[in-house]
């Protein structure tokens, strides 16, 4: 029998031993009727104190349950104090259901005790049951039980995480009703609560009315602005704190760094970190993790290495999240070997460590290495404490998808479903990109159905992925339906819809969508103008394209980049304005690249203009001699005008340089299987496409019967 068991089984007898001196004294001091009452009171008090002591010292669930039984058997369940302690003890072991049962089974008289209500509030908030905490709070108020300085912070924490500003204002009113507006701890929690629901204007009003402020109050405000991506508000509060004679502490500095990092203002974050170091006020592990993540996002490898040195020098090696941030930093900067070495040196690794290394390989395009690490994690002998989660799966699925290995990406996604790991928005977005690449409309529809069942179709990342998939698969009506159902559509959503219309030659629809976007209050960016100009090019809308190109700089203050010039040159060239297109290329304020010259060259092919084509080709060959497209285009242009010797000379030149054209490919999905067709590959036995080629022959004959003739202008030999 353990010491605890001995105490439990002998609780009643011990109480009597402890009580006997008190009973003797009582008989000497009081009449019999009072002596019985006092002895009973002392008995219950001492017995309850012992049970309370044992509950606080209990180390196992079994001991807690035995004490619960003892409380019931001895009639101590009438004590609201013990009922509250029992709820707290069950909560400490993570047994919320048992804590709630203990709460509900308390005597009716106990429900007037605020201590009991605070214990069940804390239990629900601790276990993340914020909606249940709301119900408890409403029940309290209905029964007329007030709240105090312990209740309000718990309620505010729950309401802040629920995210309902109306509830937050209600509890704020209750704070005034109960006279707790002068309780510093309560008011600080009000600041935190309003920050969590994005109501910093309300937090600011509360803050300005505070008669007393501590470091905690100021830090709550700076942290609130940081959470809401308002670094200007954070720095304003930071400076005001200094002007009022209160020195910002480490928590304040960490919140300030976090606010600038969240807003993507990387240079400012690193600047403030430097100021922090100059002032010699020390640093926190959290601040280091923030700055390291900025080095990862901004590509500042050298600065990241310097901070790594400070991590070692400052004794922060034992902070696992700091080392995980370092792995991410090295991986995103392409220093995968350093990330791997750092990972290997770690004595303790968690799931974040493994995911950081997998992501490092995946983002660097090293899909096989990423999958190898992923397989190691799957092997329970290597890391028995961790197994792949949704982030691990998403990293390898997305890695293969981004490198064009759609088949492997889809296979991993199927394995992920078999492993019963629920996909997140990032996984779905990666798979939808594969469906778009292969024009796999059937599979894309299945994924769409999956997102609806998983209630993910409202996610903006998933919605944009669906628009991209449907437009590239030619299902514009479905894309428009998804677009219209997105509540919080962003600029990417509009750009994808415009691009979808453009790639299918529906320039007028693209322009209408462009106008709707601006009326909805969205300002176009560089990508918007690329897709709009491209839409005008495919639809032959020359005047509209010219107008939009001019408006880029004059109206929207966006300086045209090389990709915009490529679009406008393509637009003018396709429409036959070759001279204007050629002059635009020559007058560009930036150096034209092979894509701009290639657009002009393609227009020369369309209009059989060998003079401009020859000049353009010479420019392209001087820029990029490792691509075959320009050689092929020039050869085809010569062939289309009957200049066979010049055509052959260009091809011989390309061959002499060791250039070889990559065969063109196309694919189609039939009965959930993707069939790939390659130029020059007619092996129908291997591909099983004999029936397809027979249908193509029939279509060719039908075209001839109806008077259509093939375009032989680009035939590569004199037929």
Image (cartoon, grey):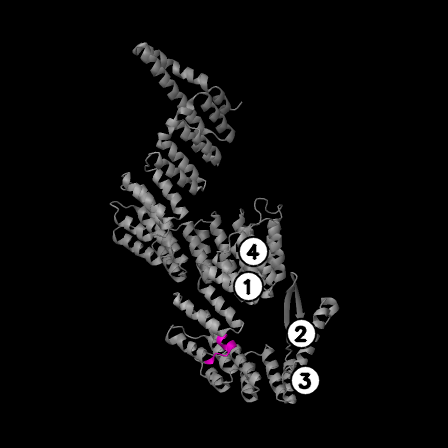
Which range is magenta? 534-542
Foreground pick, 296 / 128? 128
Label pair 2/4, CB-CB below 8 angstroms: no
Label pair 1/3, CB-CB below 8 angstroms: no
Q: Please name which of the two marks, 2 or 4, marks the residue nearer to the observer.
A: 4
Helix, strand or loop at disc 3?
loop
Q: Please name which of the two marks, 3 or 4, marks the residue nearer to the observer.
A: 4
Badge 4 is on which residue? 449
Could you tell which of marks 3 and 4 lies nearer the N-terminus? 4
Badge 2 is on which residue? 679
Residue 717 numbered mark, or none: 3
Instruction: Give the spatial CA distance, label 1 vs label 4.
Output: 14 Å
Badge 1 is on which residue? 469
Could you tell which of marks 1 and 3 lies nearer the N-terminus? 1
Residue in the image at 58% along x and 59% along y: 445
Helix, strand or loop at disc 1?
helix
Helix, strand or loop at disc 2?
loop
| Vertical side of 514 occupied by 207: above or below | above
Q: Residues within 10 Å of mark 1 (few under 14, many from 20)?
A: many
Could you tell which of marks 1 and 4 lies nearer the N-terminus? 4
Residue 23 quadrant: top left
Q: Please name which of the two marks, 1 or 4, marks the residue nearer to the observer.
A: 4
Q: Please name which of the two marks, 2 or 1, marks the residue nearer to the observer.
A: 1
Q: Position of residue 332 (x, y in %)?
A: 51, 60
Could you tell which of marks 2 and 1 lies nearer the N-terminus? 1
């Amino acid at each position: 029998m353990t010491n605890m068991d001995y105490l439990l089984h002998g609780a009643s007898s011990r109480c009597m031993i402890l009580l006997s001196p008190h009973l003797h004294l009582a008989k000497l001091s009081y009449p019999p009727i009072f002596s019985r009452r006092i002895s009973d009171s002392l008995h219950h008090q001492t017995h309850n104190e012992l049970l309370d002591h044992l509950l606080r010292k209990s180390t196992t669930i079994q001991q807690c349950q035995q004490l619960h039984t003892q409380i019931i058997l001895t009639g101590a369940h009438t004590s609201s104090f013990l009922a509250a302690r029992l709820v707290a003890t069950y909560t400490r072991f993570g047994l919320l259901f048992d804590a709630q049962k203990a709460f509900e089974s308390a005597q009716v008289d106990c429900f007037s005790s605020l201590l009991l209500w605070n214990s069940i509030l804390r239990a629900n908030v601790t276990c993340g049951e914020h909606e249940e905490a709301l119900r408890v709070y409403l029940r309290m108020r209905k029964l007329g039980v007030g709240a105090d300085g312990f209740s309000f912070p718990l309620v505010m924490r729950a309401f802040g995480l629920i995210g309902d500003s109306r509830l937050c204002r209600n509890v704020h009113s209750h704070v005034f009703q109960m006279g707790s507006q002068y309780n510093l701890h309560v008011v600080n929690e009000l600041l935190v609560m309003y920050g969590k629901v994005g109501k910093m204007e309300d937090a600011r009003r509360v803050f300005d009315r505070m008669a007393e402020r501590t470091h905690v109050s100021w830090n709550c405000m700076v942290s609130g602005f940081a959470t809401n991506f308002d670094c200007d508000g954070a720095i304003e509060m930071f400076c005001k704190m200094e002007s009022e004679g209160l020195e910002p502490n480490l928590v304040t500095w960490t919140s300030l760094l976090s606010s600038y990092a969240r807003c993507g203002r990387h240079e400012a974050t690193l600047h403030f970190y430097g100021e922090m170091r100059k002032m010699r006020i020390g640093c926190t592990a959290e601040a280091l993790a923030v700055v390291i993540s900025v080095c990862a996002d901004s590509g500042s490898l050298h600065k990241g290495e310097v901070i790594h040195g400070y991590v070692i020098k400052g004794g922060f090696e034992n902070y696992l999240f700091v080392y995980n941030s370092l792995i991410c930093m090295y991986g995103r900067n392409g220093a995968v070997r350093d990330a791997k070495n750092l990972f290997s040196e770690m004595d303790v690794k968690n799931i974040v460590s493994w995911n950081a290394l997998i992501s490092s390989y995946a983002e660097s395009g090293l899909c096989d290495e990423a999958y190898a690490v992923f397989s190691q994690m799957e092997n329970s002998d290597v890391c028995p404490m961790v197994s792949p989660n949704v982030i691990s799966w998403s990293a390898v699925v997305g890695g293969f998808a981004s490198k064009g290995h759609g088949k492997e990406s889809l296979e991993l996604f199927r394995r992920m479903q078999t492993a019963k790991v629920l996909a997140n928005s990032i996984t779905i977005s990666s798979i939808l990109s594969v469906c778009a690449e292969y024009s796999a409309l059937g599979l894309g529809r299945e994924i769409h159905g999956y997102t609806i069942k998983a209630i993910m179709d409202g996610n903006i990342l998933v919605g944009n992925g669906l628009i991209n998939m449907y437009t590239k698969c030619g299902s514009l009506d479905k894309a428009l339906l998804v677009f219209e159902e997105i509540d919080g559509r962003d600029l990417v959503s509009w750009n994808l819809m415009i691009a979808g219309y453009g790639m299918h030659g529906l320039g007028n629809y693209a322009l209408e969508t462009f106008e709707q976007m601006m009326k909805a209050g969205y300002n176009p960016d560089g990508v918007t103008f690329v897709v709009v100009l491209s839409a005008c090019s495919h639809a032959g809308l020359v005047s509209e394209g010219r107008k939009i190109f001019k408006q880029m700089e004059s109206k929207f203050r966006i300086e045209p980049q090389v990709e915009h010039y490529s679009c406008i040159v393509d637009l003018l060239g396709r429409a036959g304005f070759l001279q204007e297109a050629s002059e635009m290329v020559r007058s560009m304020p930036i150096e034209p690249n092979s894509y701009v010259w290639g657009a002009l060259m393609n227009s020369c092919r369309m209009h059989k203009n060998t003079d401009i084509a020859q000049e353009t080709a010479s420019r392209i060959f001087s820029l990029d001699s490792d691509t075959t497209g320009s050689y092929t285009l020039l050869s085809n242009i010569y062939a289309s005008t009957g200049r066979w010797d010049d055509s052959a000379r260009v091809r011989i030149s390309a061959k002499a340089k060791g250039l070889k054209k990559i065969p063109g490919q196309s694919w189609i999905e039939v009965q959930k299987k993707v069939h790939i067709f390659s130029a020059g590959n007619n092996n129908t036995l291997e591909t099983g496409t004999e029936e397809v080629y027979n249908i193509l022959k029939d279509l060719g004959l039908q075209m001839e019967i109806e008077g259509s003739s093939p375009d032989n202008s680009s035939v590569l030999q004199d037929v």
